[in-house]
Amino acid sequence: MIDDVEHILISEQEIQQRVQELAGQIEADYAGKDLLMVGLLKGAVTFMVDLARAMDRPVAVDFMAVSSYGASTESSGVVRFLKDLDESIEGKHVLVIEDIVDSGLTLQYILEILRQRKPASLRVCVLLDKKERRQVDIPMHYVGFTVPDAFVVGYGLDFDQIYRNLPFVGVLKPEIYESTLPDASSSAEAG
Ligand code: PRP
């Protein structure tokens, strides 16, 4: 698996250090309030679990799963619901956890749905911000790292469901995705 990685973009140590920092910020910001972390399956799971474990306070967790219609390397903004939350979020302090924001279309859709459910507050914590590819403005309160427009995998992010369990974030070798996705060379979304 590691042989398919061109280079490591963010090391395991850098990720863990940043997770600790973010957890500290979140703990301080939500002091005295209940906190519900909503993870977007599947990419956010690794980040969310590490983040929650880095906090010395009660944290409730729930999950949503959506899937983008259309070409596999481009977010179309048309989203299919695969799994909804188990519990109501009305009156709760909700922190959405995401592994990567690319076009922003997935998160825009999710946030609109969650807003309609009247949470007490709604914020976003994202590990990787691929700013260059943003199509819509997304309010992001906690950001781990800004990353270039490269095909990144690891620490939850996949290509073809592989590489999620790498402990670092790396750039995939082009030959891995070019053979599978002929249109992928100009678009560097993974995760
Ligand atoms: C990835 C990622 C975000 C979305 C970002 O999910 O986890 O949800 O794409 O892209 P966008 O900002 O352009 O909408 P993916 O569909 O790969 O699912 P996964 O989390 O199961 O890997």
Image (cartoon, rainbow, N blue to C red):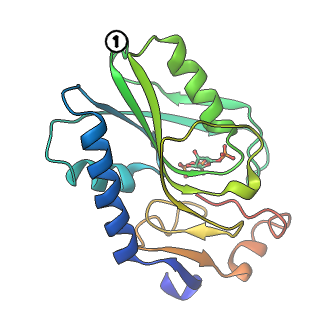
- At label 1, the amino acid type is Gly
In the rendered image, the residue lying farthest to the bottom is: 3
Residue topped by disc 1: 91
Kindly tell me whether residue 167 is visible in this rendering.
no
Ligand 1 neighbours mark 1 (CB distance < 8 Å):
no
Indicate the position of residue 19 as horizontal and vertical percent values.
Answer: 34, 59
For residue 152, above or below residue 72? below
Q: Residue at x 37, y 56 (%)?
A: 46
Residue at 25% from the left image edge and 42% from the top image edge: 27
Choose top left, top right, bottom left or bottom right for residue 91.
Answer: top left
For this rendering, which residue is in front, 41 or 22? 22
- Image height of 123 relative to 90, above or below: below
* Horizontal relation, residue 47 to residue 124: left or right: left
Quadrant location of the C terminus?
bottom right
The reply, left or right, for residue 87 in relation to residue 117 is left
Determine the residue positioned at 70% across, 37% down.
137
Q: Nearer the viewer, residue 27 or 43?
A: 27
Residue 68 position, x and y percent, is 68, 39
Frontmost residue, 87 versus 104: 104
Establish if 109 lies above or below 24.
above
Q: Residues within 10 Å of mark 1 (few under 14, many from 20)?
A: few
Side of 5 where 62 appears, left or right = left
Relative height, residue 103 to residue 115 (above, below): below
Query: Residue 28: x percent and y percent?
Result: 25, 41
Question: What residue lies at 31% left-to-right and 37% top-to-bottom?
Answer: 29
Q: How many marks can you see?
A: 1
Name the element at disc 1. loop
Which corner quadrant of the image does residue 61 belong to?
A: top left
Q: Which x, y percent locates residue 183? A: 85, 63
Looking at the image, can residue 178 be seen?
yes
